[in-house]
Image (cartoon, rainbow, N blue to C red):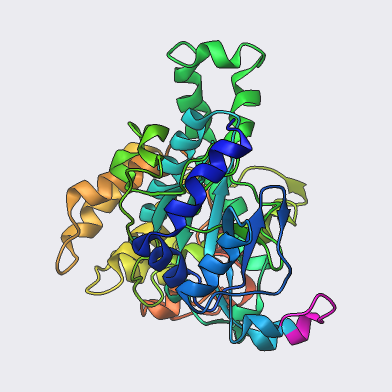
Amino acid sequence: MVQEEELRGVVFSYYARKDIQKAILDFSKNRETIPRYIESFGKRPDTLEYAGDLFEHVKKGATSFHVSEELWQDPLQLKTEMSRQEQDELRQGWDLLVDIDSKYLDYSKIAAELIAEALEFHNVKNYAIKFSGSKGMHIIVPWKAFPKEINSIEAKNMFPEWPRAISRYLQEFIKKQLIERVSELTSGKISKYIKGDKEVGDAAKHVVPDIVLVSSRHLFRAPYSLHEKTRLASIVIKKSDLKDFDPKSADPLGIKPENFYPEAKEGEARELLLQALDWEKAQEKPKPKIQGQYKEVKLRHFSSDLYPPCINNILKGMKDGKKRGLFILINFFRSLGMERDAIEKEIETWNKKNSPILRQGYIQSQIDWTFKQKPLLPQNCDKPHYKDIGVCFPDNICSGIKNPVNYPFRKMGRKSRG
């Protein structure tokens, strides 16, 4: 904790720097941007248009700046009493902001690394990480990375529901590894800090993504804004530097600003969003009933004769969409209970038919990651995944199922009745 006098001593000179002003100003474009004065926030709505606006707030006592996840046509038109429809009309889009908070910085660093790996697993390559200024981390995926429409629903209007679903999905996706990694630390360098935690699982709860804060008009600390309690700056960090990150490197006297908003590829987070929405929907419903009872879905005999057309079309080999095809195949076979060695052999045979083939290292990394998580169903049949990669050619059985894993059982049922 720093004293107010100590904070005041650095605020004026720090925010007077042109490079710091530019870093905050560039990121705040089209965002609601609110100054904080030690313990209270400035009036809302507000925004920054010029460096002079930022420094005027500083001269009036501002110590940090906080920005919205939502992108607006004109943030100054926002009103507390606005209806959902009015907000949707004004909103241009939203960024995914995963807010990692913990009692211990070491835990936040682990969680940030795992979430970054999870994003990459879902083919999201353009994201950025920054230090919160205290004990947390922020990870951002730009609005450009998301599809603008899913099943005729405008993505810009689905805030906070869709980013919240992604945060929950990512939280579940890393849960097992998070507990394992935190467990390793309990006998290491920070064990003295967690003596009060009776179980590793309790400790791990401190670093999962904070989904509560994913809400309408939610604000988070702007990149390179100072933190009132530590006097440290919210600096950008590379994934490769997370493990050895030292808060001392965020001392405002010696930092050099870097861009926190990467140039994403159009729609690169489509797979992540669709998978998260499928997972979210699955949490609201009980497991599928088979013959009147709830039980695990497991196929005893694997044969292409029992697979749905989409799976067999993928297995013929692909020119485009191979990474999506791999994701579907792994989840399909694993959801039906196929053993890992059998999946690896099936994937190896499939990849030889691809043109060009996928790198073996990439395939192995996807399989390794998947088997560290709970099994996930492949995307439902009504999702665009299968049509997007040109493998959806339904037969008369497909019309009666919701997910490819249901197909073998439906087909076997027909054979037994025949």
Residue 365 within the segment the image draws in magenta: no
Q: Is residue 229 above or below residue 258?
A: above
Q: Is residue 48 above or below residue 57?
A: below
* Position in image of residue 292 (x %, y %): 78, 51
* Position in image of residue 40 (x %, y %): 73, 53
Q: How many marks?
A: 0
Q: Is residue 194 above or below residue 221?
A: above
Q: Quadrant of residue 175?
A: top right
353 relative position to 258: left or right:
left
Whether residue 2 is visible here, answered yes or no, is yes
Nearer to me, 417 or 76: 76
* Position in image of residue 362 (x %, y %): 24, 51
Q: Could you tell me which residue is drawn at 52 percent across and 59 percent down?
A: 222
Range covered by the magenta-colored residues: 78-86
Q: Pick the quarter of the image with the N terminus.
A: top right
12 relative position to 210: left or right:
left
Q: Pick the quarter of the image with the C terminus.
A: bottom right
Q: Main secondary structure of the magenta part?
A: loop
Whether residue 224 is visible here, answered yes or no, is no
Nearer to me, 241 or 418: 241
Q: Could you tell me which residue is drawn at 56 percent across and 78 percent down?
A: 93
